[in-house]
Image: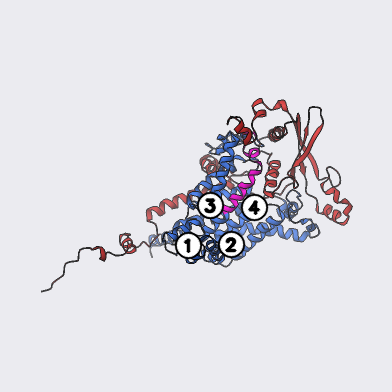
Amino acid sequence: MSFKAPAAPPMKQNRPPAQEREAQQRPRGRKPGQLSMFVKLVVSLLVSWHVAAVFLAPLSIQPTSPLVQRIAQYYMQWYLDALYINHGYHFFAPDPGAGHLIRYQVIDDRGVIKEQGEFPSKKDNWPRLLYHRYFMLAEQCEVGAPSEAEANQWRDDFLKAYARELLRTHPSAATVRVTRVIHYPLRPEDAIRIKEDPSLEQYRAAPLEYPPTYKVEAEVTQRRNDLDQTQATQATSWRQDVASGWQGGVR
Amino acid sequence: MSERGGIRGYVADAWGAWDTFWFTPTNPATLSAIRVFTGAMLFYTHLVWSFDLSGFFGQNGWLPTQLVHRVHDLANSGPDAPSFRLIWSYFDYIHSPTVLWIVHVAALLVFFFLMIGFFSRTMAVLAYLIAISYAARVTPGAYFGLDKINCLLAMYLMLGPCGARYSLDRIWRLRRGAPREVPPSVAANVAIRLIQLHMCIIYLFSALGKLQGESWWTGEAVWISAANLEYQFLIDLTWMANHPLLVSFLTHATVYWELSYSALVWPRLTRPWVLLMAVLVHGGIVVAFGMPTFGLIMIVGNLAFVSPETVRRWVDPMANRVALMLAGGGGQGRAAAAA
């Protein structure tokens, strides 16, 4: 006759360590830290959607097919916008182009030029990242519009905004004139001539002389009357803001 | 083997490969290192906005809100217009300079905490939302590649345990008796895989975009960039005018490297060379093309392809030293484990 001892009731001191308990409770075949099949399927669907969106965003940049445009812009645009992944990643493409500068003149009510300058400016815009932000202001005036006339209108709207900002930061100014200048890169042969003849060095940055690397593209003028009253009197610093009882707006 | 069995085997193999790719737990060292560098870059990027905060983020600064919104609306016209757009920025709702500065300082704190790994995961979520708000407000107008990469890295950091190493969180956990060895994590692997794929897509489309341009075919593109005085930074590259063959070589090498990146970065044999080229190309952008921040953040993105073991070999000694300083003499054991 065999005798089988009854299993001992689980006692506190006999309980397996926490890791073993966890392993016993885990479905067979799953290693620690691994996910269930259901979670894997859900994650797989999400990453597939996401990677497809990341891929289709640059694929939908013009020129593109109506199919891609429809999928990316009609069905995925909300996702691309919300996550800020709506980019083409066409760095220095299709061709690295000419640089652009914004030149400005601050003019008082007697017509006297009180200040003139340009941005980006290696002298005034420091650190380098700030320089690059102003450089982008000069570069990104161009908006893809259906016609050249509309594109020019968009560019002028940006330039007017820059002029109005200069009016706000120069309270004594009556008028601000803003010019967008294209700065074409030197041709290799011109660079060689400048290197061989140091007296030509001055022309590297001289407008509309030899070599003709600068060209005025557009000019706008804004007068103080063009600022509406609220914009003209808005607070521009936290001190003014506090002084005005938190009523001031941001320029 | 029957045809059905063959298909079943193929599907099982495909799922196995997919499963290994996405769901193999990995050491979070690489993700943690990316957190430190991305946090530092986000902090610096946004600190620089302080020089002209009202100008760039005020309602009527260089880029008036109305004008930026009008540009966004432009894409909503036409037959293939998006169903709806979700471009958002909390700067649209800030009308007071005082509030603007308070929000800005709070954002800088978030980026700083992300860098040092203080409530890392929470800070990663906040950093991502904040970084989008800044970038979307100046898009178009003053944004560039740096903002795109900053945002994408912050996005993926919040998916994984980015504070598992090289963080105050880690020191804190060790003081509370957490095990010295950080467990591998599936979430860390998913985050790293997404960064890797995103980097591949970036380089692929950067190359495809270049192939639409003539100067990348004629070998002149590097010259045009080098001769652009607005980009010129630490080094004057116009000496290259005397070396047209070198200019052509650099132009073609850039395109072929970008084009092949998404294929050659995966095999172990070619990966080190592809990454070395990434360091050279982006290092060149740092010193020559006046975009040190963009060049550096692209190198940080490439860090996703460096194994956690390699990251630990490079970063642990530095992290130990920092942790020793923070923990003091008595905490040497803790400090060594903090890495």
Kindly indicate which chain is depicted in red in the rendered structure. A
Can you tell which of label 3 and label 2 is closer to the viewer? 3
Measuring 76% from the left and 30% from the top, which residue is drawn there? Answer: A175
Amino acid at dot 4: Thr
Of tags 1 and 2, the one toward the viewer is 1
Q: Disc 1 to disc 2, how far (Cα)?
A: 23 Å
Task: Please tell me whether mark 3 or mark 1 is closer to you in this view.
Answer: 3
**Callout 2: helix, strand or loop?**
helix
Q: Which residues are magenta?
A: B38-60
Q: Are marks 4 and 1 in contact (CB under 8 Å)?
A: no
Question: Which is more toward the observer, A180 or B338?
Answer: B338
Given residues B330 and B187, the one toward you in this image is B330
For residue A197, say whether it is visible. Answer: yes
Residue type at mark 2?
Leu
The answer to whether residue B3 is left or right of residue A58 is left
Q: Which residue is mark 4?
A: B293
| Residue that numbered label 2 is attached to | B264
Q: Residues within 10 Å of mark 4 (few under 14, many from 20)?
A: many
- Discs 4/2, front: 4
Q: Earlier in the sequence, mark 3 or mark 4?
A: 3
Parent chain of label 2: B
Tell me the number on the disc at residue B114: 3
Amino acid type shown at disc 3: Leu
For marks 4 and 2 on the same chain, the one whose residue lies earlier in the sequence: 2
Question: Dot 1, how many residues are within 10 Å of its Cα: few (below 14), some (14-19), or many (20+)?
Answer: many
